[in-house]
Image: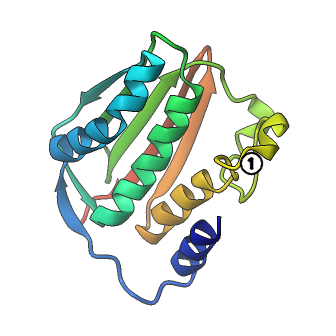
C-alpha cells in the first residue's frame, strides 16, 4: 500500500517529463496477455486482443495502467467469459479498451470509481489486495499523458477506455 501511495504522490507532483514513445500495440498486448495468462486460465477466461495502432505512451506508465485494468477485469469477469483488449483511433486519440463480461458497476458508482480508496463493494474493504487505489493510479497516469480514462458498465459488460493523445 505504501508503494502505491508513493506512486500516486510522485505522479501527482511529477517534475520529470514522461518518456513518451511509440509502442507497438500487438507487442504490448501480447506482453500483458502472457503476464496474466495463468490467472486467466485459472478463472477460465480468454484474453482476446485486437488492434495494430501505435500507442503514444510512456512504456512503464502504459504497462502499469493496463495491468491495473486487466487485474480488475479478471477479478470481476464471469468464468468461461472473455476479456477483450483493443486499440482503435478515436479522433485525436488512440483509444485502448479493456472489456470484461460480469457483474456491472451500478450507475451511482461510475463517477466515483477513480477516487482514491473508493470501492464499489464495501464487503471487500478487508481485502489486502484491493485497496481502492488501482483506478486512481490509472486516472493519474492518463492525466500525466494529457489524456483521459472513461468507464461504461451496463448489461453485463464493463469497459474502461484509455485515451492517449496522438502526438503530431
**Image location of residue 162, percent across then percent down:** 43, 48
**Image location of residue 161, percent across then percent down:** 46, 42
Q: Can you tell which quarter of the image residue 72 is in?
A: top right
Q: Nearer the viewer, residue 7 or 140?
A: 7
**Image location of residue 160, percent across then percent down:** 50, 39
Image quadrant where one finds the N terminus: bottom right
- How many neighbours does mark 1 have within 10 angstroms: few (below 14), some (14-19), or many (20 or more)? some
Q: Left or right: where does residue 49 sit relative to residue 5? A: left
Count of marks overlaid on the render:
1
Q: Residue at x 73, y 44 (%)?
A: 127
Q: Nearer the viewer, residue 126 or 48?
A: 126
Q: Nearer the viewer, residue 3 or 119?
A: 3
Q: Residue at x 58, y 53 (%)?
A: 134
Up/down of 92 relative to 83, above or below: below
> Which residue appears farthest toward the bottom when viewing the image?
15
One can see residue 62 in this view: yes
> Which residue appears farthest toward the top when viewing the image?
80
Residue located beneath label 1 in the image: 112
Q: Left or right: where does residue 143 sit relative to residue 164? A: right
- Colouring convention used in this rendered image of the protein: rainbow
One can see residue 85 in this view: no
**Image location of residue 55, percent across then percent down:** 24, 53
Q: Residue at x 62, y 14 (%)?
A: 155
> Which residue appears farthest toward the right when viewing the image?
122
Q: Can you tell which quarter of the image residue 70 is in?
A: top left
Up/down of 59 relative to 122, above or below: below
Image quadrant where one finds the C terminus: bottom left
Q: Left or right: where does residue 21 sit relative to residue 2? A: left
Up/down of 122 relative to 82, above or below: below
Q: Secondary structure at mark 1?
A: loop
Amino acid at each position: 500500500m505504501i508503494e502505491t501511495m508513493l506512486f500516486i504522490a510522485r505522479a501527482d507532483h511529477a517534475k520529470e517529463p514522461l518518456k513518451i514513445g511509440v509502442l507497438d500495440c500487438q507487442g504490448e498486448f501480447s506482453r500483458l496477455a502472457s503476464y496474466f495468462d495463468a490467472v486467466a486460465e485459472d478463472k477460465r477466461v480468454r484474453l482476446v486482443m485486437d488492434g495494430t495502432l501505435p500507442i503514444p505512451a510512456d512504456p512503464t506508465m502504459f504497462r502499469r495502467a493496463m495491468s491495473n485494468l486487466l487485474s480488475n477485469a479478471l477479478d470481476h469477469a464471469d468464468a468461461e467469459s472473455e476479456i477483450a483488449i483493443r486499440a482503435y483511433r478515436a479522433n485525436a486519440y488512440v483509444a485502448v479498451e479493456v472489456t470484461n463480461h460480469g457483474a456491472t458497476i451500478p450507475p451511482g458508482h461510475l463517477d466515483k470509481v477513480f477516487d482514491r480508496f473508493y470501492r464499489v463493494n464495501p464487503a471487500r474493504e478487508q481485502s489486502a489486495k484491493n485497496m481502492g487505489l488501482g483506478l486512481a493510479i490509472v486516472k493519474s497516469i492518463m492525466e500525466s499523458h494529457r489524456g483521459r480514462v472513461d468507464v461504461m458498465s451496463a448489461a453485463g459488460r464493463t469497459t474502461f477506455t484509455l485515451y492517449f493523445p496522438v502526438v503530431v
